[in-house]
Image (tube, grey):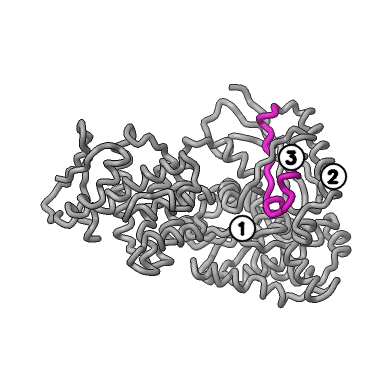
Amino acid sequence: MENRLVAIIEIGSTGIRLLVAQMQSGKSRQRDNWKPMDSAGRPVALGRDVFNSGELSRETLLDCLSVLQNFKELLESWDIAAGDVHVIATSALRVARNRDIFIDRIRQETGFSLSLVDGVEENRLLYLAVRFALKQDLPLFWRANSMILDIGGGSTEVMLLRRGQMVAAHSIKLGTIIVDQRIRHRAGPGLFNETHLKEAIRDTTHTLNADMDLSYVRIFVVAGSDARLAADHAGKELNERCRVIARDDFTAFAEKIKNYNAEECVQKLGISYLEAEGFIPGILLIKLFLEQTGAVQVVVPLVSIREGYLIDLALGVDSEQQEEFYSQIVASAVNLGRKFHFDEAHARHVAALCMTLFDALVKEHGMDRHQRMMLETAAILHDIGAFIKSSGHNRHGQYIVSNSEIFGLPRDELDIIANVIHYHRGRMPTQADIEYISLEREERIIVLKMASILRVADALDRGHSQQLKKLSVERREETVALHAKGAYDISQELVALEEKADYFQAVFGYKVVLS
């Protein structure tokens, strides 16, 4: 396979940015299997429109179309195949009321097919990019608590990691443009009061501290153009794709520029007026988040979700990186369970039994590796609803998961997992179950398959004692025989299996027996 060129166009809150890269052949799939060839960016006021009025103005739409037409001409000079041009949009377009009209106009006038990236996907792509930029040059990232922050115009993406394992990921509706508008509304044009920023992040930091005590964060990673500009003025090089700023140096820089107006930012920092409008709020938001942590430096990767998208393309779906990513999703689910005081030993044991059944019955269920991870996540969280009330905890668990964020899982997959949790006990779904029938047909089938496996695994630990540690699975003509090795009292498990295995038989046609 020959080298091919790929283009990523990102439509953000403050501008449209292009990255052209060459995907290199002759190398195994890895995150550096590409090299940048060209880049461009143009400021556009999408966020200012959307966060003021809720929709894009005609003028901004025309500005976007003009920029995209220019980028299209640039890409034609590179001779990039249409299928290798990826156009993505983030928070501003996600919330615009007239986004569908905007997307259709882009397709009609440029031929570009635009994909909306939700907050969870932004987190995933940013995580890939940050890992790529850090390389192995910051070993403390894997040994200490870390926080990854990306403050955009319309949202702030936050990831918390404990010794390299994902604790939580949040997409928060707090961005530089939104903050700037709140301050102007409350304090008057031209005035800036740091107190308003502290109020803006107070609820956010309360939520984050519930996931992990921020005072124990030692690695503070900040992506985005505001942080990169600060690194240019106050930082030093860690490697060619990463800078570091000492905590005191960053604080001094923030104090120095916090009283600049937009004109002074343009003149003294060399940025556009549109970028200047959100620059001061961005820097001070970083400062206020930094003050909540125990980090001694600010780590600034010179990457964005565009690089994350390229890395995703380079890695493919069968890479070691994908396996590591799945482990981060499961780690995030475990930490969600801890937040609701779940029985972790039982949850992990049931998840392990689910994986044993899944792997032994691949021909019967036909699900893939990604769905295996989803089942493991559902098994980890199947009893989380007991935090609310033991009676009906399956329904409570469905509610908790449906209204939570798990790193790496988009909303449609969370909905599937929540439904699996609902049906891990009790009756089978009916046409009266709105959350179930609102799923696509294929998704409903996946729920039935996963729930039937989870019900069997949960029955095998009815006493929450984790007795059945060694289980083998034998598929016979009409039965699935489960063989438990060792001398155990399995009377509770036999009764539970009798109650819950009928679901498995209805879905797969096999009776489950335990010996």
Q: Label 2, label 1: how many angstroms apart (C-alpha)?
A: 29 Å
Question: Which residue is painted at 46% across and 42% down in the image?
Answer: 443
**Is 69 left, or right, of 495 in this rendering?**
right
> Residue tagged by mark 3?
104
> Residue tagged by mark 2?
62
**Is 378 left, or right, of 237 in this rendering?**
left
Image mark for residue 157: 1
> Residue most toward the front?
432
Question: Is residue 95 highlighted in magenta?
Answer: yes
Q: Label 3, label 2: how many angstroms apart (C-alpha)?
A: 13 Å
Question: Which residue is painted at 54% across and 37% down in the image?
Answer: 315
Mark closer to the observer (1, 3): 3
Query: Magenta region: which residues?
Result: 81-102
Asked if residue 428 is positioned above or below residue 75 in the image, the reply reads below
- The numbered mark, 3 or 2, whose residue comes first in the sequence reads 2
Local crowd size for mark 2, using a 10 Å CA cut-off: few (<14), some (14–19), many (≥20): few
Residue 116 visible in the displayed image: yes
**Is 449 left, or right, of 197 in this rendering?**
left
Label 2: state its secondary structure.
Answer: helix
Specify the amino acid type for callout 1. Answer: Glu
Mark closer to the observer (3, 2): 3
- For the C terminus, the image quarter is top left
Specify the amino acid type for callout 3. Answer: Asp
Q: Contact, CB < 8 Å: mark 3 with mark 2?
A: no
Local crowd size for mark 3, using a 10 Å CA cut-off: few (<14), some (14–19), many (≥20): some
Front position in the image: 404 or 242 = 404
- For the N terminus, the image quarter is top right
**Is 86 left, or right, of 143 in this rendering?**
right
